[in-house]
Image (cartoon, grey):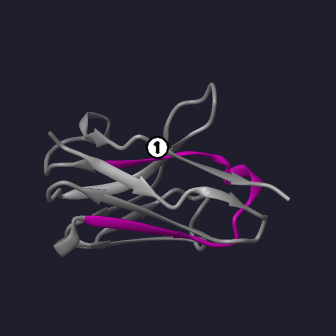
Amino acid sequence: QVQLVESGGGLARPGGSLTLTCVASRTFYGMGWYREVADEKRVLVATITSGAVTEYADSVKGRFTISRDNAKNTVYMQMNDLKPEDTAVYYCNARPYGTVWFNGHWGQGVQVTVSS
């Protein structure tokens, strides 16, 4: 059974920083983060492949950085210059090669709240 264990969420002030970490129980081709706000659909934040190819939502480009340690089956997301609109539940996603993200595996989600 695949497990994705997320950590690092919490409360930050506008302009502040948080780092999210997700540890997978095995190796996956693609790993990333999606976020969800109540009554809205889950959307891409950032993804990274095992070959370090990254993709970011336009709203986080220049502020968030995704990285991974393949040896540790771990993906990180450094979030800087946080804004209130970044408030959401963030979900780790892991997918095998050839699998689309919505058919991948999901973590339990971590709350990120940006508020003064």
Residue designated by label 1: 109
Quarter of the figure that contains the N terminus: top left
Image coordinates for residue 78, horizontal then vertical, percent = 52, 71
Magenta run includes residue 10: no
Where are the magenta residues, as a range?
Answer: 74-93
Image coordinates for residue 50, horizontal then vertical, percent = 20, 67
Q: Is residue 34 left or right of residue 75?
A: right
Residue for point 72% across, 50% down: 85
**Vertical order, 106 against 13 (above or below):** above
Q: Tag 1, which secondary structure?
A: loop
**Vertical order, 49 against 107 (above or below):** below
Residue for point 74% across, 60% down: 83
**Vertical order, 103 against 97 (above or below):** above
Image coordinates for residue 9, horizontal then vertical, percent = 56, 56
Q: Nearer the viewer, residue 11 or 48?
A: 11
Looking at the rendered structure, the kind of residue marked 1 is Gly
Residue for point 30% across, 60% down: 23
Magenta run includes residue 86: yes
